[in-house]
């Protein structure tokens, strides 16, 4: 198989002389003098154009062999190789003083700097539109697959491939990445001891194990230079090393082992599968600190490893299947937990971890990928309403010391991502009426809820409903955790409370994902035409049905949740 692809695209942006963008830029570089105005940027429109081209080639050759023999054996084998080459180029440029009627442009000196607002804002150079880039990616793959079946009962599979890319190390053994997988399956239903059991329709055990590879463009084997048009002071072209060379760069490898069961009972009224997996992702790319005397404080290298395990269960129940009445249910439940086993990258400060709240990838050894941390909270001071934290094991209100404390003194709550998640779907059909309900659920995670920030309230009127719950007099500390209002507002005090354990809640919840009810009007339409149709009403983003949070916030959204979407309509086909 040979495939070639060519893509071209062109972009054009024209700002007329009357547009705000053009007028503002012209005025910005205009100098008032005793003899009048000097327009360092010519009066006229601004035109920018871009052109991109993509050229890719792919070649694949494959041989297949498939045969059955002795009425018990079946063998299928294939092998081949694949090559791909992809080149992308982007060109962009622009002009000033452009007149769209007569197609003329003005001259601009990009090498000089000009005073902005008569020097009140310093000097600046006229922005340049020039941008040129070119990227080449090449991949080579060798692969083979084999499957053997004995008596339609025992199955053995084996696959192997070797991939190479020009993105990786100069050493051959790092350019090439061997990938493989193997599997076994046992169709137990064909065994004599299950063949006569009528209520068992299918029962299969399976096992697979294999290695896959990931490709990342975050680093390359050779140094990457970025050429820029002009330096700020010399006004001469220059280049910077965007990323240092890494001749030892390798593929990210993922070793996966899976144990599975597929089943079907009672004339396949109950079907489903259960899978348990263990995964080890090694040689993960991450920012790694290096000797700063090299000119860089860090670089992207293969330094990480993540261990994961979990299970996935899917099941379908056909409760009723009779005539024009049917009722089916589907349920799915998954559990996944990822632990950072090795991480040699930069460890963030304690303040960064509590501020992230697990919303940003912040790896930490022996923790989940998206950990939730908080400052220890000991309640409110009964006399002042100030929040109380912990410093060196003792209650403290020294907020500067508390927020700069080490990571080991924070409260660790767990994962910001749900460990358990799934859905429960129901379909009911009663003659022309159909009802569908989809309920989703997530369990086993935490989130940091928003709260009042007094500096934000005072400086920018950023209010919050927790303001009415604030401490106002002695005794309020018995029924609230919201500190008293201070003025002038102490931002460190506010941040300590905002990211303390008082505002961390469990994110377990069940929500109505969607629902739909419809009425089939085919019989009604057949009186006038040979068609079909439905009258329907549906809802999407139905909202939270149950939650473990006490604050009422939607755990899935840090801001406003998506609005409920109601639709009523008629769908006709003629």
Image: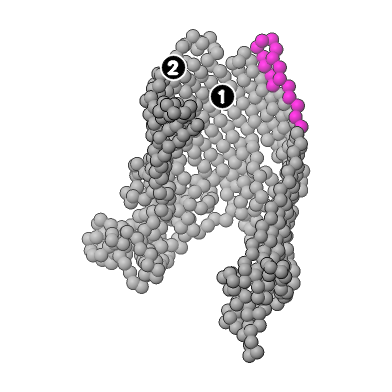
- Does the magenta-highlighted stretch encompass residue 70? yes
**Depicted 385 relative to depicted 488: above or below:** above
Viewport quadrant of the N terminus: top right
Q: Nearer the viewer, residue 319 or 44?
A: 44
Residue 500 in picture, x, y percent from top left: 39, 57
**Residue lying furthest front in this view?**
528
**Depicted 444 relative to depicted 478: above or below:** above
Query: Main SS type for the magenta part?
Result: strand
Viewer-side label of 1, 2: 2
Residue 226 in picture, x, y percent from top left: 71, 61
- Mark 2 highlights which residue? 266
Q: Residue at x 42, y 23 (%)?
A: 318
The image quadrant of residue 476 is bottom left
**Residue lying furthest bottom in this view?**
34
**Depicted 198 relative to depicted 238: above or below:** above
Provide the residue span drawn in magenta: 61-76
- Does the magenta-highlighted stretch encompass residue 387? no
Q: Nearer the viewer, residue 69 or 461?
A: 461
Q: What separation in Å lies between label 1 and label 2 (alpha carbons)?
A: 22 Å
Q: What is the number of the mark on residue 53? A: none
Left or right: 406 as drawn, with respect to 219: left
Q: Secondary structure at mark 1?
A: strand
Left or right: 284 as drawn, with respect to 390: right
Left or right: 53 as drawn, with respect to 196: right
**Depicted 328 relative to depicted 31: above or below:** above
Q: Is residue 8 visible?
A: yes
Q: Secondary structure at mark 2?
A: loop
- Mark 1 highlights which residue? 206
Residue 525 in picture, x, y percent from top left: 43, 29
The image quadrant of residue 224 is bottom right
């Amino acid at each position: 198989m040979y495939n070639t692809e060519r893509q071209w695209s062109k972009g054009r942006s024209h700002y007329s002389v009357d547009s705000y963008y053009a007028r503002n830029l012209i005025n910005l570089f205009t100098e008032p003098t005793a003899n009048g105005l000097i327009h360092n940027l010519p009066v006229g429109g601004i035109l920018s154009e871009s052109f991109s081209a993509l050229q890719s080639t792919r070649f694949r050759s494959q041989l297949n062999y498939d045969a059955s023999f002795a009425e018990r054996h079946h063998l299928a084998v294939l092998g081949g190789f694949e090559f791909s080459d992809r080149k992308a180029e982007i060109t962009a440029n622009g002009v000033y003083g452009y007149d769209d009627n007569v197609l003329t442009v003005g001259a601009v000196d990009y090498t000089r700097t000009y005073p902005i607002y008569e020097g009140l804002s310093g000097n600046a150079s006229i922005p340049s539109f020039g941008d040129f880039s070119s990227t080449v990616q090449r991949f080579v793959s060798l692969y083979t697959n084999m499957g053997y079946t004995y008596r339609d009962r025992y199955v053995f599979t084996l696959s192997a491939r070797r991939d190479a890319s020009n993105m990786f190390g100069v050493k051959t053994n790092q350019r090439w990445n061997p990938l493989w997988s193997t599997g076994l399956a046992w169709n137990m239903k064909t065994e004599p001891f299950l063949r006569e059991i009528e209520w068992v329709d299918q029962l299969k055990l399976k096992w697979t194990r294999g290695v896959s590879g990931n490709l990342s463009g975050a680093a390359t084997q050779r140094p990457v230079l970025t050429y820029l048009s002009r330096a700020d002071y010399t006004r001469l072209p220059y280049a910077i090393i965007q990323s240092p060379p890494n001749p030892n760069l390798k593929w990210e490898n993922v070793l996966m082992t899976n144990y599975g069961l597929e089943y079907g009972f009672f004339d396949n009224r109950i079907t489903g599968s259960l899978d348990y997996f263990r995964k080890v992702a090694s040689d993960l790319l991450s920012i790694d600190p290096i000797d700063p005397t090299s000119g860089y404080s860090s670089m992207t290298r293969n330094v990480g490893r993540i261990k994961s395990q979990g299970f996935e269960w899917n099941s379908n129940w056909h409760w009723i299947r009779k005539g024009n009445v049917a009722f089916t249910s589907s349920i799915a439940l998954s559990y996944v937990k990822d632990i950072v086993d090795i991480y040699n990258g930069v460890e963030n400060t304690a303040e960064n971890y509590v501020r992230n709240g697990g919303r940003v990838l912040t790896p930490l050894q022996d923790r989940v990928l998206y950990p939730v941390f908080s400052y220890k909270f000991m309640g409110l001071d009964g006399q002042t309403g100030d929040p109380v934290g912990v410093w060196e094991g003792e209650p403290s209100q020294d907020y500067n010391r508390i927020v700069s404390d080490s990571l080991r003194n924070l409260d660790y709550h767990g994962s910001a991502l749900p460990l358990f998640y799934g859905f429960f779907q129901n379909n009911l059909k009663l003659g022309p009426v159909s009802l569908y309900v989809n309920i989703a659920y997530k369990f086993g995670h935490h989130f940091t809820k928003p709260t009042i920030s007094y500096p934000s309230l005072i400086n920018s009127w950023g209010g919050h409903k927790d303001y009415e719950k604030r401490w106002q007099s002695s005794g309020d500390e018995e029924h609230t955790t919201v500190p008293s209002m201070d003025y002038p507002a102490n931002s460190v005090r506010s941040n300590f409370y905002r990211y303390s354990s008082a505002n961390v809640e469990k994110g377990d919840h069940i929500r109505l994902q969607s629902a739909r009810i419809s009425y089939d009007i085919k019989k009604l339409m057949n009186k006038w035409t040979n068609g079909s149709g439905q009258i329907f009403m549906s809802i999407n983003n139905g909202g939270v049905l149950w939650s473990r949070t006490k604050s009422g916030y939607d755990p899935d959204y840090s801001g406003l949740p998506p609005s409920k979407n109601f639709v009523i309509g008629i769908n006709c086909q003629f």
